[in-house]
Image: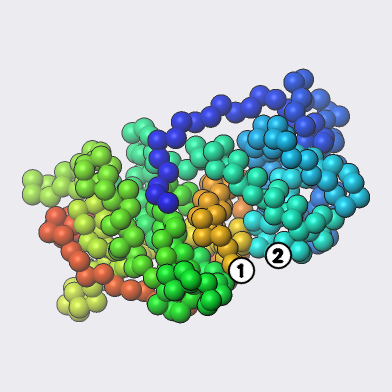
Amino acid sequence: MGPVRGIRKRRKTEKSLDNNGSGSGSGSGSSEKEGVVDWWDELSKKINGLQKSPLKISRKTFEYICSLVKDDITTKSAHFSFSSGKPMSLFDQVAVALRRLGSGDSLVTIAESFGLSHSTVSQVTWRFVESMEERGLHHLQWPSTQEEMNAIKTKFEKIHGFPNCCGAVDATHITMCLPGTEYSSNVWLDYKNNHSMVLQAIVDPDMKFRDIVTGWPGKMEDWSIFSCSNFNKLCDKGERLDGKVLKFSEESEIREYIIGDSGYPLLPYLIVPYEEKELLKSEAKTQFNKLHLETRMVAQRALTRLKETWRIIRGNMWRPDKHRLPRIILVCCLLHNIVIDMQDEVKDELLCLYHHNHDSGYNQLVCEDADEKGVALRESLLSYLNGRLHS
């Protein structure tokens, strides 16, 4: 799956939701709002006795997600019901789907907690995924205005001084459980002897995904996936990272770029750390690497938060459909971005616990490819940052 771009923003629905999760043409009155609160409290008690945020999101964010998928879920012909015979409302269906994506629990476990059959949980979740793929895509796009890009560059520079930086790239493995008898299982076997699929993400300073690539087998190296990406091709054509160039001296200029770890090549628009052998006699380069690491840490935090919040992609997925898995990953990324866009409160205590290790068990592979223009840009950045430190 290539990066998502060029998606037109959809108009927010103006219809309110009644306490059954149905559409209503009237304004939202107090009785409707009270109905939603009661439903939310009931859900909180139903799921493991939790009293707050049973779905890891706020009530406001939940209602917004419902408004996105409402038309698809309420107009399609399928009718789902609980074991008691009670029909499932829009709220019920969205709650089940979010619980499945957020907990990573089995279909049977989810079904038992809601009083449903496991096949209903599967169908409801997939209908939600299909709807979110279309209705939520405007939450994952490359900045479309210079004003938006300038805000991103300003925030990155405030972290540790990197000017004109537009994003941080990183990749993570989504592990799967595939039987060895499956004819295609070896295709997905990575260098750690796990079956996995890779997610590559370019992240902004707010930990929001701006571009993703997924669907490639876990055996592929980070640099290979990046080189195959549409983002890289657009950069090569001069159609991305082609904004204002900064000139801070007659000899040095700094174009737009992103940063990544040593698993990526040094390119005119992708800056990676200096190799260990280059640090032995250079305190300036050692300091550069330190600031580079602390700046790109935002990508590691984003992927850690993604996998801790939407746990269906955190652990081993049992015999997933390889055609559906990239779509599930995409929707988890959309939900991650929606939480940020809605300014929802997200608690990141777990990030410290896991030390931002979103890819436990996988070692850092090193790509030694270096483009001449990339070398020149990194030297310009080194000079700029060194000048700031000693000014």
Query: Residue drawn 41% across and 58% down?
Result: 200
Is the Cβ of the residue at disc 1 closer than 8 Å to that at disc 2?
Answer: yes
Query: Residue drawn 34% across and 60% down?
Result: 225
Q: Find residue 371 and report its horizontal and vertical position in percent.
A: 16, 60
User: What residue did someone put label 2 on?
Assistant: 106
Q: CA distance from mark 1 to mark 2?
A: 9 Å
The tag on residue 282 is none
Three-letter amino acid code at disc 1? Answer: Trp
Number of marks in the image? 2
Q: Find residue 164 and report its horizontal and vertical position in percent.
A: 28, 46
SS at mark 2 in the image: loop
How packed mark 1 is, by other alpha carbons closer than 10 Å (few <14, some 14-19, many 20 or more), is: few
Residue 337 in view: yes
Q: What's the coloring here?
A: rainbow
Query: Residue drawn 18% across and 64% down?
Result: 370
User: What residue did someone put label 1 on?
Assistant: 318
Query: Residue drawn 82% across and 35% down?
Result: 19
Q: Residue furthest right?
A: 84
Residue 345 falls left or right of residue 381: right
Label 1 vs 2, first from the N-terminus? 2
Three-letter amino acid code at disc 2? Answer: Ser
Residue 53 in view: no
Q: Quadrant of residue 313?
A: bottom right
How packed mark 2 is, by other alpha carbons closer than 10 Å (few <14, some 14-19, many 20 or more), is: some
Q: Nearer the viewer, residue 81 or 37?
A: 81
Q: Find residue 374 and report its horizontal and vertical position in percent.
A: 18, 57
